[in-house]
Structure formats: structure tokens, C-alpha cells
Image (cartoon, helix red, strand yellow):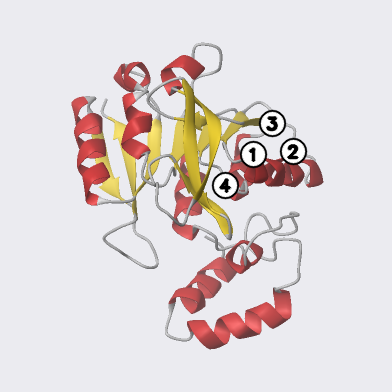
Amino acid sequence: MTLSQTILSKLWWGPLRRPFEAIARRLWGKQSTIQFGPLKGASFQGGLACTLGIYEIAIQEVIRAQLRPADIFYDIGANYGYISLLASTLVGDRGAVYAFEPLPENIQRIEQVLSANQVQNCHVVSVAISDQTGTALLHFNTDSRATPSLTRDTANLDSVEVATETLDHFIQDHPLPHLIKLDVEGAESMVLKGAAHLLSRPDAPTWVIEIHDEDNDRKVTDILELNQYSINNIIEPRQRVYPKHIIAHKKS
């Protein structure tokens, strides 16, 4: 983490959050480039945390520590593409990033980010990774398309039919990942169920997973431990019971 990110993150999550955010919005709220951190100068249209370079700051640090040049990275639930953009700079020309995002509006945003930054090593995959290959309803809030989900179905959410695919099917025709970031808003155990073969391999990837509830926590833990993974919680600026992030490594 750069010094600027450390300071900004403490202000963002500290007791001075409200006045700091007001000042930050006046200074940088209309910027279309990232102002701090390893992606400083990159073109990106997102929230203020993205502009400040502190979006998912703990996850940024884990990914920077895990990825090496020539690695393959899967970003499942890529959202607007911030983590995919970061990963593309880490794996370099000999590596590749696969950004999985099913929501059409988000896909368009990712493609704009990649084009604006002339990224050549990131491939957008417009499917929802799940436990079966086919189609499913993706639920989302029309006011904020940042958290679409296969598992939420409430009266105040819209939905769209999207293609679904399992990881076991996808890896038949694509390079195996070294690292997977999984953020699928409550469908994390479904993704792991569709990755049974990948998880069982001795060269199975490391996973960084956002866990959204107790039920998924239990299911994800059971699946990973069954496949000989060690699991650790990721320390974040604001620790919550849920959602939380874990990192899981295959035991040697």
C-alpha cells in the first residue's frame, strides 16, 4: 500500500470520514482518472473511493502480493473493472486477466475502461459463473448496478436473463488461473460447486472470496476444506461479520 493510500484509507474509514469525504468530493469528485495508488493516472469512471485509489483497498493489497508477471487471473464479478485493471498491470503482457461480468451495463463500463487505458491483456467474459451452464435470472437494483446477484429475488429488484457457465466448463478451453477473485453477492457457494474439478487439482488456484452471509460461509468453508485448502480472513479497514473476505490456498 502506498503512503497516500494508507493516509486516505485511514481518513475514509476513521471518525473524520464525513468532513474528509466532503472535501475530497470538492477536490476530486469530478475527476475521470484515479488520483492515488498504483493505478494513479489511469482513466476510470467510478465512485469516489475508486478515484482516490482506495476501492477495496485490502483486496488490492492481497492481489498485489499474490500476482506475478505471466500469471492468469480470473475476476469473477468484475463489476466496473477496477480490480481487473489493477491485475492487468501486474500480470503484464505475458499474463492474462479474465473479467467475468454478466450485467450488460457493467460489461459496457469495463470495456470502456479497458479501451481508455489501452489494456490488451484483459478479456471480458459476459457470463455469470455458477453451478450450471445455461441461463438464469440476474437480479439488480436499477438505481445501483454495482451488486447484481443470482440469489436475491425481492420485490424492489429488477432482473435480466443472463448466460451462466461453470468454471469447470470454462477451463476446458482457457488457461488455468493462478488466482481467482470471487465477488458474486451471495452466489459464492454456487460458483464453487461448479468448480469441483478445478478445486480438486493439485495445482488448484488461490481464491480471494467475499462471503456475504453465514449460510454461504459454512458452505464455502466445507467445500474448500474438503479440497484441502487452508483459509484465512483478510484484515480490512472496517471489520464486519458479513460481508467479509477470505483468502484460501491449496495445501501442499
> Looking at the image, is mark 4 or mark 1 earlier in the sequence?
4
> Looking at the image, is mark 3 or mark 1 earlier in the sequence?
1
* Front disc: 4 or 1: 4
Q: Which residue is located at x 37 percent, y 23 percent?
A: 195
Identify the residue position indicated by label 2 in the image: 119
Instruction: Give the Cα distance between marks 4 and 1.
Output: 15 Å
* Amino acid type at image mark 1: Ser
> Looking at the image, is mark 2 or mark 1 earlier in the sequence?
1
Disc marking residue 79 = 4
Crowding near pointer 3: few (<14 within 10 Å), some, many (20+)? some
Disc marking residue 88 = 1
* Amino acid type at image mark 4: Asn
Identify the residue position indicated by label 3 in the image: 121
Instruction: Give the Cα distance between marks 3 and 4.
Output: 18 Å
Question: Label 4's element?
Answer: loop
Q: Which residue is located at x 38 percent, y 31 percent?
A: 191
Q: Quadrant of residue 130?
A: top left
> Looking at the image, is mark 4 or mark 2 earlier in the sequence?
4
Disc marking residue 55 = none
